[in-house]
Amino acid sequence: MSINLKGKSIISLNDMKKEELLYLMDISKKIKEGKYSNFLEGKIVASLFFEPSTRTRLSFQSAIKYGGGKSIGFATSKSSSTEKGESLADTVKTVNGYCDAIVMRHRIEGAARRASDVSTVPVVNAGDGSNQHPTQTFLDLFTIIEKKGSLNNNVVGLMGDLKYSRTIHSLLIALSHFDVKLVFISPEALKIPSRYLEYLKSKDIDYEIYNDFKDCGKSLDILYCTRIQRERFYDPMEYESVAGSYVIDKEGLEYLNKETYIMHPLPRVDEISVEVDDDPRAIYFEQAHNGVPVRQALLGLLTGTIK
Amino acid sequence: MAKNNSERPYKVFKIEKGTVIDHIPAPKGLLVLEILGKENDGIVSIGLNFDSNKVGKKDLIKFENKIIDKEETDKIALVAPEATINIIENGEVTEKRSIDVPQRIHGFLKCMNPNCIVNVENLESKFKVIDENPVKLRCDYCERVWEVKYDMIEKNRKSEI
């Protein structure tokens, strides 16, 4: 099967085929190894961040610059015509004449899909409200492959806010293309929604559910943590009583396997103690850095400068 | 003591020409009526909560003179795929219409997510049918999944009244 992502918009994991994911991973690896340079030369990427972001925006900027391209755009909606009441479609129909690709973050869900409806250049969704954030998932997959050699034959623990985290939901959909076992670890109030469990059953993916990572940590190849937000709990007492079970500190490390890698989409607050950072299993900063080659690969493929 | 429902004869106005929508699982009869609209060149009769071997409790609607079209059949399929549709001419059933759940829905229903771009910018909604029993729709934009409910019918939305 030949894979051609040129001109395609990347809006949701639901649109991505397994082969496309693997191809993107392969190109990302080659970029990280330095096999492509200046492939974005002469290309302009518009970065439309209607909502603030640190990692995603800066790593896209970095990806564009390492690739030899140029970027235009804004970092908050305050500096765009949206403030004057312009519709999203009008903004996109204007900007697409200034660039070769658009990277967009918006607090409204479906904004990126709407942009791709009207855009003449590829649109990359860099987060639309609580819906999708596909490039985060790409760098997560890339990091797992880098550490484990493959996406297959892994037991992946997903911990924290499994109910609301878009990162978790997208990663789950992507991993369901592969031979993995998923282990869900969360308090009752933030457990994985049943529609995802039904989806996994339909894909024949094994899963287990726990309340505490200490009960399953030794079986994990990857432990992917997310933040538990206090405001998700109706009763603050309940938050206090459960939050401690989802903090990884030096003592918590004892409950993990010697090769259980700890991942996190960042920003972390207190769910992973700073003392864990020096442990070789803590790979969340490496994970964040992988955003650059993965986003380079994506932009190269979408603009057709990498085939 | 009241008679058992199944022994009680029921009369719903007999029609010479029109459409009978039967076996609508209760209480979805009013929802089906809302979807199709009450405007009609003839009597519209509705019966609620009959006993049914097929669906437990059922509702039934008869439209005198109105032969429903494919688009209307598709709309019924979204909320009551179990329903049966009979077309009546000269007092006889001339067609038993099969109900197929459509794969895509454009317009007609609104996404219920207030933070969806469709609602924020007043766009035409688009849904993909991802499950048929019960029917579940995924919004093309915000990707939320919905079962069809009363509030989703476009004309009921306050902003449109």
Image (tube, grey):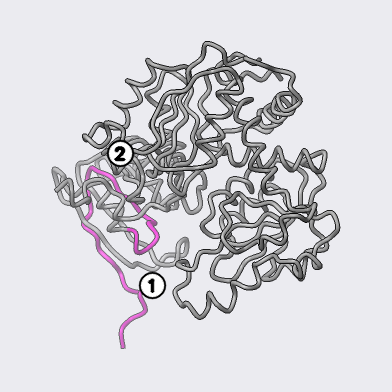
Counting from the top left corner in percent of width and height, residue A242 is at 59, 75
Kindly report the secondary structure that dominates the magenta region of the rendered protein.
Answer: loop
For this view, does A92 lie left or right of residue A40? left
> Compared to A181, does A179 lie above or below?
above
> Compared to A77, does B31 lie above or below?
below
Counting from the top left corner in percent of width and height, residue A208 is at 72, 62
For this view, does B29 lie left or right of residue A62? left
Dot 2 crowding, Cα within 10 Å, few <14, some 14–19, many 20+: few
Q: Could you confirm whether marks 1 and 2 are on the same chain?
A: no
Circle 1 — which element? helix
Circle 2 — which element? helix
Counting from the top left corner in percent of width and height, residue B25 is at 40, 60
Counting from the top left corner in percent of width and height, residue A108 is at 37, 43
Residue B23 located within the stretch drawn in magenta: yes
Residue matched to label 2: A78
* Callout count: 2
Dot 1 crowding, Cα within 10 Å, few <14, some 14–19, many 20+: few
For this view, does A301 lie left or right of residue A91? right
Numbered disc in front, either 1 or 2: 2
In this view, the residue farthest toward the top is A42
Which amino acid is tagged 2?
A: Lys
Instruction: State which quarter of the image contains the C terminus of chain A.
Output: top right
- Asked if the residue under mark 2 is in contact with the one under mark 1, i.e. CB atoms within 8 Å, the reply is no
Residue matched to label 1: B6
Please give the chain letter of the residue carrying mark 1.
B
Please give the chain letter of the residue carrying mark 2.
A
- Which quadrant would residue A151 be assigned to in this image? top right
- Span shown in magenta: B1-28
Residue under the image location 45 percent in, 25 percent down: A102
